[in-house]
Image (tube, rainbow, N blue to C red):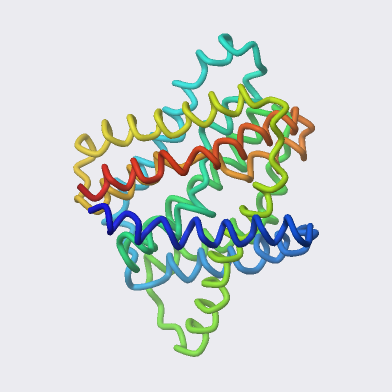
Amino acid sequence: MFQRILGIILPVFLIILVGYFYARRVKPDMAMVNRISMTILAPALIFSALASKDFSIAENGPLMLGSIGIVLGSGLLAWPFVRLLHVDYRTFVPPMMFNNCGNIGLPLAALAYGAPGFSAMVALFTISNLLHFTLGAWMIDHHARFGNLLRNPMVWSTFLGFAFAVVHPPLPEWSSVAIKMVGDALIPMMLLSLGVRLYEVRWDDWHLGVVGGLVCPLTGIAIAALLGPLLGLTPMQQGLLIIFGSLPPAVLNFMVAEQFRQEPAKVASIVLIGNVMSAVFIPLGLALALH
């Protein structure tokens, strides 16, 4: 078991470290890289995974419902900490709800469960993103315009991918291979980008980051352990839900906070310190998932 967990987490953390040391040496501007990832690579990955034969909406429906339960439940459990920390709920609660199921969750699922697990985690990733762009944006700004959501390539690829998952129309092999090749490039790119972000970590609000780094995975794991039996998940689905729950806050939280000017420095500390602390909670999540 120990060797299997190491075999899963070491490649992930090694690529993150490469990004960290590269940023320390070069200090790259990641704006264009992130734009390409979000507008080309991520949509290709989402569509390719959802439209593949390894993914079934009917079989993974309870799992996707469980991910919604973790997002909403984590937000509710995080609410009492807002008063204890004397912090704005718009700063603290969204990072507890929306975790790093893209940068870290996707490669973990692929290494732990292969193609079926990867496709299922992509579905959880798309649901989390849709909730983040709608509910999460509304929590920070009640006047947020959701019309921008319809112009997001990841949203279009999600709807198109789910439509293909239902109908399964024939696709030329050359086109599906090309889309998959583009999408597969997202995983190492996201890990490298996370390493670059970790180099920029701010320790000004370290206490807030430490609390967030504890609350996010602990509430997620607890809710996943509760929902798994209630939803009648298979062992693999239960494991994926626990891995999903054990993940740290998503880097996207910082980008959203920056967009809405919602104390982005504090959110950055929560996100980045939480990702550093994931070195403890991800092995714990994997141990629970694979036992």
**Along the line of sight, the residue nearer the viewer: 159 or 66:** 66
Q: Position of residue 60 (x, y in %)?
A: 31, 54
Residue at position x 57%, y 26% in the image: 93
Q: Is residue 202 left or right of residue 167?
A: right
Quarter-wise, where is residue 162 in the image?
Answer: bottom left
Residue at position x 28%, y 58% in the image: 3
**Along the line of sight, the residue nearer the viewer: 138 or 285:** 285
Q: Position of residue 237 (x, y in %)?
A: 27, 50
**Along the line of sight, the residue nearer the viewer: 238 or 160:** 238
Compared to residue 82, the image places residue 228 above or below, namely: below
Quarter-wise, where is residue 259 in the image?
Answer: top right
Report the number of discs. 0
Can residue 126 be seen at all in this image of the molecule? no
Can residue 26 be seen at all in this image of the molecule? yes
Compared to residue 51, the image places residue 60 above or below, namely: above
Q: Position of residue 52 (x, y in %)?
A: 39, 72
Residue at position x 52%, y 17% in the image: 79
Residue at position x 45%, y 83% in the image: 171
**Along the line of sight, the residue nearer the viewer: 283 or 56:** 283
Q: Is residue 243 left or right of residue 174?
A: left
Compared to residue 173, the image places residue 12 above or below, namely: above
Q: Position of residue 43 (x, y in %)?
A: 58, 65
